[in-house]
Image: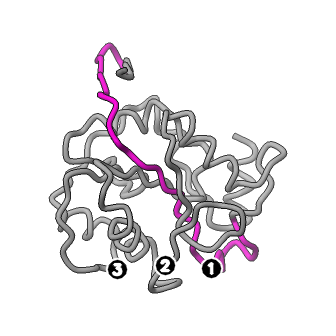
Amino acid sequence: MAVVVVVKGVVVVLAKKNIAGVVLAGGQSSRMGQNKAQLDYNGKPLLEHMIGVLEHVGLNDIYVSGEFDGYRCISDQAPYEGPAYAIYDVLKVLKDYDGVLFVPIDMPLLHVNALHLLMGQEKGSYFTGFPLPAFIANYCLKERTKSVQSFLKSLEISPIFLPSEFEFCMVNANTPEEWKEVLSA
């Protein structure tokens, strides 16, 4: 079974592959002042919402990067070193998948069709100007880097243009003020 996505008249057909989804949730949430995974978003914890986003993308195997009771978690080998290190650790564990779709915990407005566009890229991709979310496929791990964008470049993963209809969904909430903006969107 294939997934068909139409964006601005462009048809993207996604072959069903062995793809895992990962919510990056292992950060300290220091700028937010509380654990972002537990923030209330539409009546449920933000972590549950982000898992739901990956389920709506059509993924069955969903993991959480970090430590959360009751979830399929992949522990960070270098806790609080940032998302690039977490992605590296996850890819080492999920090496038998054809690809892995990474979404950050703090982007609740992500749109399923935007994520499908990323998953339609053979080697994987991310949007220009936004290293996350990212789809990584057909990779050969090299060394860790602190920057997600540098890490993706080392994997020879290229960005794609973000269609204007998805600009709204790239809001990242790291502070209480940004969180209020997300809730009012």
Find residue 158 and report its horizontal and vertical position in percent. 20, 51
- Residue bearing mark 1: 28
- Residue bearing mark 2: 76
Task: State the residue lying farthest toward the top.
Answer: 9
The residue at the point 76 percent across, 74 percent down is 34
- 3 or 1: tag closer to the N-terminus: 1
- 3 or 2: tag closer to the N-terminus: 2
- Spatial CA span between label 3 and label 1: 16 Å
The residue at the point 25 percent across, 70 percent down is 150
Quadrant in which the N terminus is drawn: top left
CB atoms of marks 3 and 1 within 8 Å? no
Local crowd size for mark 1, using a 10 Å CA cut-off: few (<14), some (14–19), many (≥20):
some
Residue 90 horizontal side relative to residue 97, left or right:
right
Q: Secondary structure at mark 1?
A: loop
Find residue 3 and report its horizontal and vertical position in percent. 39, 22
Identity, as a three-letter code, of the amino acid under mark 1:
Gln
The one of 176 and 68 positioned closer to us in this rendering: 68
The one of 11 and 31 positioned closer to us in this rendering: 11
- Spatial CA span between label 3 and label 2: 14 Å
Residue 177 horizontal side relative to residue 153, left or right:
right
Q: Magenta residues?
A: 7-36
The residue at the point 72 percent across, 71 percent down is 35
Label placed on residue 146: 3
Identity, as a three-letter code, of the amino acid under mark 2:
Asp
